[in-house]
Image (spheres, helix red, strand yellow):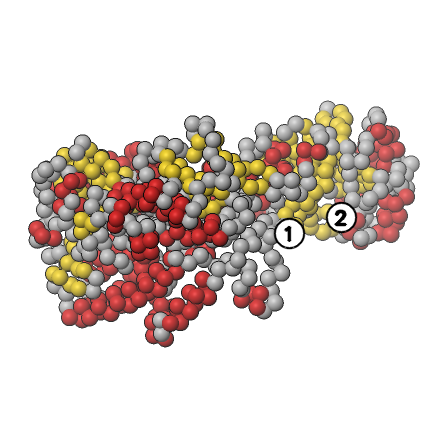
Amino acid sequence: MTIPREHYLQAVFPTPFHPRTAAVNTLNVWHRWRDYTVADAYFDVALEYTALRNACTVFDLSPMTKHLITGPDALAFMNRLVTRDVAKVKPGRVGYTVWCDDAGQVVDDGTIFHLRDHVYRLCSQERQLDWLLGSSHGFDVSIVEETHDVAALALQGPTSCALLKRLGLAGIETLAPFGMRSFAFEGGELMVSRTGFTGDLGYELWIDPELAVPLWDRLFDVARWWVSSRWAPWHSR
Amino acid sequence: MTDPGTIVIVGGGHNGLVCAASLARAGRKVLVLEAADQVGGAAVTREFSPGFRVSSGAHLLHALDPVVERTLKLASHGLAFARTGLNTVALGAGDPLILNGAQVLAGEVSATDRLALAQYVSRQRRYAALLARQNGRIPSRLGAGFSVIRLFGGGANNRITENPAPMPWSLAKFAFDLRRLGRADMRELLRVGTMPLYDLLEDRFENAQLKGALALDGVLGARLGPRSGQTFFTSLQRAGAYGLPRGGMGTVTGALAIAARAAGAEIRVSSPVASIRVATREDGGEHVTGVVLESGEEIAAVTVVSNADPKTTFLKLLGARHLDAEFVRRVQHFRTEGCAAKLHLALDGVPQFRGVPSAQLGERVIIAPDLGYIEAAFNPAKYREFSPAPVLEITVPSLHDPGLAPPGKQVLSAVVQYAPCDLAGGWDAGRPRFLAATLDVLTRYAPGLRAQILDAELLTPVDLEREFRITGGHWHHGELALDQFMMLRPVQGAAQYATPLEGLFLCGAGSHPGGGVMGSAGRNAARVVLAGRRT
């Protein structure tokens, strides 16, 4: 990857969903999440939370740090890195885990997406590339940060499955918690995982940034009968 | 089939042999596995040209642990000296300066300088003695047991990787030794301990050659110049008298091997170890189960002691995956870049250094004519280039030990600096150019030398790395500096000879108190093994 010479002129970017989130952000309140700006709330925190618990909402999680770990030693590396037995996270499954320093203290927590054999995506709160590379000595793995290459949208709430079915994701109701499945979407691939942090029914949608806006539009097209229900969790914790 | 109770020692260098002998004397079964076809590691004598033999690594003995020498009865096992107490002959623009400790045997040195030298050397010896007292002690573990932080209620960040062996009190003993120096010496040590020799010597001496000679002690073997910090500290490692073992350094390790075998240890040469074998217990913990040789042969052992350097031991033989990430990072950051080359010349006669009386030609001849010269020689090394005009420490051991060369011929052995192991462009291209630069400097002081050369061998750090299997070709297995010293050597978590992996120990120069053919590390490691971490 070549870094443009003017990289310093802009340090914080709009997310791939920004054209849409900006259009509905009636409060015009934003905050910084790593390299991106995200909305604090759109029009009313209490209503948004109510929608989350009673219907479903979207949440732009594109800024979440994502790493792609590939290579013959990917599994051995993951097992060295985290506290759980990654061999039990089969391809097509997601595992929640933590990783620790030498003293056994938590460095960060996150989710492991076993995309296919020898290919894992590790999502984390903090940037972990340094720790991952430092932990990889002696392993035949490639580790790249792919935060900017994958747009992600959480769709959470009790009606989220129904909405995805309306979107045309056949069989989505059979996707078990911590499972993931890919669907064709407008010439690209939409990966859906049954994960999220509401503790309720919910999904995370992973897609090429180019297809982020089309995905948003399709979701809101099929959800037009919905009460406006965009959600940002920042004030609802 | 080896008895799994056997302690396997990876590498038969001097520390591995000392460790083997110590363990065997304590009644343990010991098997030493040496990669080369003779024991000795970097303390060996070998033929570099038909009929010419030389100490191909270390070439002067000045720090051998007296406890090792005595308890292993090295004298009765063949250790004899061709010469002890070598003078230092410092070449320069004018007449050479001949020194022996605080004595000036020849050269134009003012009364002021003579007095300053006497004070300097006597103080240096007291400090060196203080350090030597630490050599036989197992370094303390910081953060476990005795800790200032814990005294004040801290230390909640208790490292679970600390091994549970009893706490060595060596840090407290070191503090007590420091205090016993007396107020003036202690205060001065605190002041000069981290000082660059350049400033210290400029403060105290007038004579340029004298300053150059004293500065060389602080930079030999190190990637440091006189203006580098802590070179006074590094100079303390060379405060001993220089000796030439009869038959070269191989005699020292030969005697150690005889002592080890006499105590019951088995030594196998030409048996390079490829890896250290590890098994996982039910609770997930790992422990050593033996070693695998490059031949494929597997040798079972619950205790493996590695005389290899820390990077080789942890990253190559064991593998980083068996170690915690932060520990691995510390090992990777252990500075191992060798900067000293070794020159061997087969000569058709005694080399004649200009102005040096013939009786002094076999002494320790140095080319470090002044501080600026040494610093200028060091400058290119910072940028991965060799010195166009290097610094040299020269011996002609065959003058005292005629058996090293055919009748009438001589062997010259020299440490040549600076030769950074990571030379830009690589040493294959650099070697002949550095040899030419080295011979240019030598012939400046010994004009007839070139005509006397029958054969020449220059071992750059990459050659030393290949020959002795030492990462970076560093003769201490890693820079012996304050940040890699005592409880920080090689790294926190492995500084007490035990390692984070159950059953694996270190005994080489990468551990306290370092290399220089002392044998203390091997002796200390044996004590730790015998003290019995559950193995």
The three-letter amino acid code for the residue at tag 1 is Gln
At a point 84% along the width and 29% down the height, the residue shown is A174
* B531 to A203, vertically: above or below: below
**Would you call the spot at circle 1 few (<14 residues within 10 Å), some (14-19), or many (20 or more)?**
some
Q: Position of residue B230 (x, y in %)?
A: 36, 59
Badge 1 marks a residue whose secondary structure is loop
At a point 71% along the width and 33% down the height, the residue shown is A89
At a point 17% along the width and 45% down the height, the residue shown is B397
- N-term-proximal mark, 2 vs 1: 2
**Would you call the spot at circle 2 few (<14 residues within 10 Å), some (14-19), or many (20 or more)?**
many
Query: Seen in the image, is A62 located left or right of residue B315?
Result: right
Q: Position of residue B33 (x, y in %)?
A: 40, 37
At a point 53% along the width and 64% down the height, the residue shown is B146
Q: Position of residue B186 (x, y in %)?
A: 37, 71
The subunit letter for the residue under badge 2 reads A
Query: Seen in the image, is B451 located left or right of residue A29?
Result: left
Residue under label 2, please give it.
A39
The subunit letter for the residue under badge 1 reads A
Residue B155 visible somewhere in the drawing: yes
- Residues behind callouts 2 and 1 on a single chain: yes
Q: Position of residue B377 (x, y in %)?
A: 26, 49
The three-letter amino acid code for the residue at tag 2 is Ala
Residue A112 vs residue B361, the one in the foreground: B361
Residue under label 1, please give it.
A105
